[in-house]
Amino acid sequence: MLDADEVMAKFCDAGAQSVRRYFDVSGIGPEIMPEYFMPAFILDRLGDKISAMLETNFRTLVEWNAGVRARRGLAPQSHDERLARLLNESRVDMALFEAEYEGKPKEQQDFFALVEFRRGYIDASRIRSRISDRDRLLMLLAHIDTCPWGVTCGWTNKDHTEWQKDSIKGTNDRWYEKRFELPDTFGLPLFFCARLFARSSDDGRLAELIRSLPS
């Protein structure tokens, strides 16, 4: 089993490197950096230590999860049809797997985390009227029940970082960050941040989201 704190420290370090690298090769600030550059760069940096996939759709994740359940001798999983309809066309930016199974088919690998990226902020609100990235990952993890973790991440400025660190209070989420600077920010710090949460760590929010779905 991978150590979550160790993986996320390396993950955030690679995320900070991705923003610096994009600036170095483009001369353009991270405000208009394509979000897909971050997971692609992180995959390159961590790929020799942890298995990963990018842009994976819900149905493929369900198939891989079924393979893990079968390998563990678990019965086929039942799904909430309302959630399944909502998530049917969903994709996750990145799926991380346990490193010791590197090179094997994904249905023979254990999930580590499902990850969503944002540029300039972390999308982890728990507002009644909208579904955030964190909410969507909670719903996905209800189906991908062999995956222990969800991650919302991205680069942010200091104010948003502090706001997120305050908003995490009252949840069981874990917080990780890597500070860095770019030449055109005049010494103002930027951060690559991640919120890690366990699959069943916010069942109250998940139940609220399910109640709001049409029957």
Image (cartoon, rainbow, N blue to C red):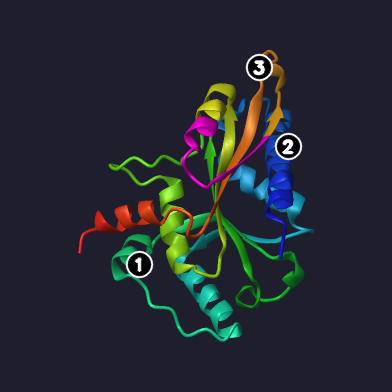
Give the spatial CA distance, label 3 vs label 2. 17 Å
Q: Residue at x 29, y 65 (%)?
A: 82
Classify residue 59 by image quadrant. Answer: bottom left
The amino acid type, in three-letter code, at marker 1 is Ala
Report the magenta residues as a range. Answer: 164-177
The amino acid type, in three-letter code, at marker 2 is Gln
Rendered location of residue 192, percent (x, y): 64, 35
As rendered, which of 38 and 84 lies closer to the eye?
Answer: 84
Residue pointed to by mark 1: 84
Residue pointed to by mark 2: 17
Q: Nearer the viewer, mark 2 or mark 1?
A: 1
For the residue labelled by badge 2, is the local secondary structure a helix, a strand or a loop? helix
Task: Pick out the residue farthest to the right.
Answer: 48
Rendered location of residue 46, percent (x, y): 75, 53
Q: 151 above or below 97? A: above
Q: Are marks 3 and 2 in contact (CB under 8 Å)?
A: no
**Comes first in the chain, label 1 or label 3:** 1
**Comes first in the chain, label 2 or label 1:** 2
Using a 10 Å C-alpha cutoff, classify the residue at mark 2 as few (fewer than 14 neighbours), some (14 to 19) or many (20 or more). some
Residue pointed to by mark 3: 188
**Left or right of residue 29, residue 200 in this image:** left
